[in-house]
């Protein structure tokens, strides 16, 4: 939520440039690590066949010495069953939906990041509404945002409970693993800032002040 609030002005500015108006955003459950062995430090990730689905997850594999394999969500169960991959990073919902407990044994609740869905509308169409209707839309958006974040927290706990009930070891990362991922996060941020420039730096600065 802090990062959302810090980044919201920049996101709104980008959307406005495309004649779009941000209404609200809702986060997905946080990302954790699925594996078939104990991961006590970053070094334990070396050589893992790591499911990658975007630039960020590919970069993580590079930084920890894992082997990135591009697999989309729909292909994940088969890739796990056939050994194409033996580890990945995603939310509890992905693990539940793909029945990851059938092939992997561990889930580390690293809370690496919380992706968000952003709901927006055409600015010109919104401006064409009368004031009472605009107010009603904004009120509904605020209500949806609050409800969505609350539901996300509920579902996060539910998914992790389900993984544990299916026999997976659901646990917090060790201090050593957490510290290793903190360094990975710092590198990912540095990589992002090279592309995001001053606007991106302003977001990071605002976030750190919260």
Image (cartoon, rainbow, N blue to C red):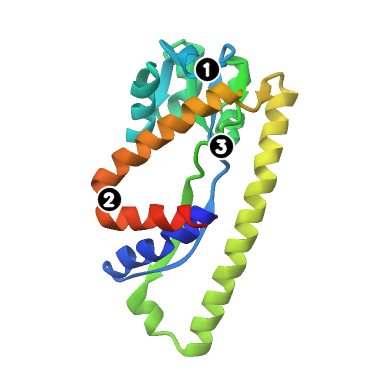
Q: Within 10 angstroms of label 1, few (less than 14), some, or many (20 or more) residues?
A: some
Q: Are marks 1 and 3 in contact (CB under 8 Å)?
A: no
Q: Residue at x 55, y 55 (%)?
A: 1
**Placement of 190 over or under 152, stated as above or below:** above
Residue 96 or residue 35, whichever sits in front: 35
> In the image, residue 123 lies at what x, y percent?
35, 75
Mark 2 residue element: helix
Point out the residue furthest to the right here: 165
Real-space CA distance between mark 1 and mark 3, rounded to the nearest whole angstrom: 16 Å
Residue 111 shows which numbered tag?
3
Decide which of tag 1 and tag 3 comes sooner along the chain.
1
Which numbered disc, 1 or 3, marks the residue closer to the eye? 1
**Placement of 13 over or under 151, stated as above or below:** below
Does residue 31 show up? yes
Mark 3 residue element: loop
**Placement of 138 over or under 197, stated as above or below:** below
Q: Are marks 2 and 3 in contact (CB under 8 Å)?
A: no
> In the image, residue 90 lies at what x, y percent?
51, 32
According to the image, label 2 marks what residue?
196
Residue 36 or residue 41, whichever sits in front: 41
Residue 41 shows which numbered tag?
1
Does residue 99 show up? no
């Amino acid at each position: 939520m802090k990062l959302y609030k810090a980044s919201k002005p920049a996101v709104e500015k980008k959307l406005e440039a495309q004649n779009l108006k941000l209404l609200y955003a809702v986060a997905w459950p946080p990302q954790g690590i699925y594996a078939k062995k104990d991961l006590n430090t970053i070094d334990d990730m070396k050589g893992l066949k790591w499911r990658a689905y975007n630039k960020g997850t590919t970069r993580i594999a590079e930084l920890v010495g894992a082997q990135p394999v591009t697999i989309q969500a729909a292909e994940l169960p088969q890739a796990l069953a056939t050994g194409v991959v033996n580890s990945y990073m995603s939310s509890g919902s992905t693990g539940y939906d793909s029945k990851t407990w059938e092939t992997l044994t561990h889930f580390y609740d690293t809370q690496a990041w919380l992706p968000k869905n952003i709901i927006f509308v055409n600015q010109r169409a919104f401006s064409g509404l009368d004031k009472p209707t605009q107010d009603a839309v904004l009120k509904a958006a605020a209500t949806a945002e609050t409800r969505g974040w609350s539901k996300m927290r509920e579902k996060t706990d539910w998914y992790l409970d389900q993984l544990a009930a299916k026999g997976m070891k659901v646990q917090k990362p060790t201090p050593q693993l957490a510290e290793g991922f903190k360094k990975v996060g710092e590198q990912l941020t540095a990589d992002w800032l090279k592309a995001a420039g001053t606007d991106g730096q302003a977001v990071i600065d605002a976030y750190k002040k919260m």
